[in-house]
Image (tube, rainbow, N blue to C red):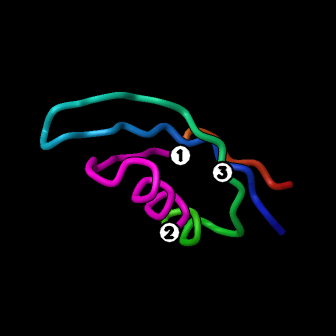
Amino acid sequence: MKTYYLVSITLLEGKRIIAETLYDFYSTDIENLKKDVTCYMRVVYPSLSCEYEVLESRAC
């Protein structure tokens, strides 16, 4: 069963905050969510690092 996660992501260049945004993810569990967020961010923003926080989760 998948779970919906609303994730707040902060994009960083070094220690400087570039942007803060919200993303929707669907994942089977929190461990896979970590992998999904990391993989997505490497593809979309390869030169930036990120910090994220789960704001909401809901079973689907």
Q: Classify residue 42 as left or right of residue 1.
A: left
Q: Are marks 3 and 1 in contact (CB under 8 Å)?
A: no
Q: Residues within 10 Å of mark 1 (few under 14, many from 20)?
A: some
Q: Amino acid type of disc 2?
A: Lys
Element carrying mark 3: strand
Comes first in the chain, label 2 or label 1: 2
Comes first in the chain, label 3 or label 1: 3
Q: Is residue 51 magenta?
A: yes
Q: Is residue 22 magenta?
A: no
Residue hosting label 3: 25
Q: Are marks 2 and 1 in contact (CB under 8 Å)?
A: no
Q: Residues within 10 Å of mark 3 (few under 14, many from 20)?
A: some
Task: Indicate which disc residue 31 carries.
Answer: none
Residue hosting label 2: 35
Element carrying mark 1: strand
Residue hosting label 1: 54
Q: Residue at 45% x, 57% y: name it.
A: 43
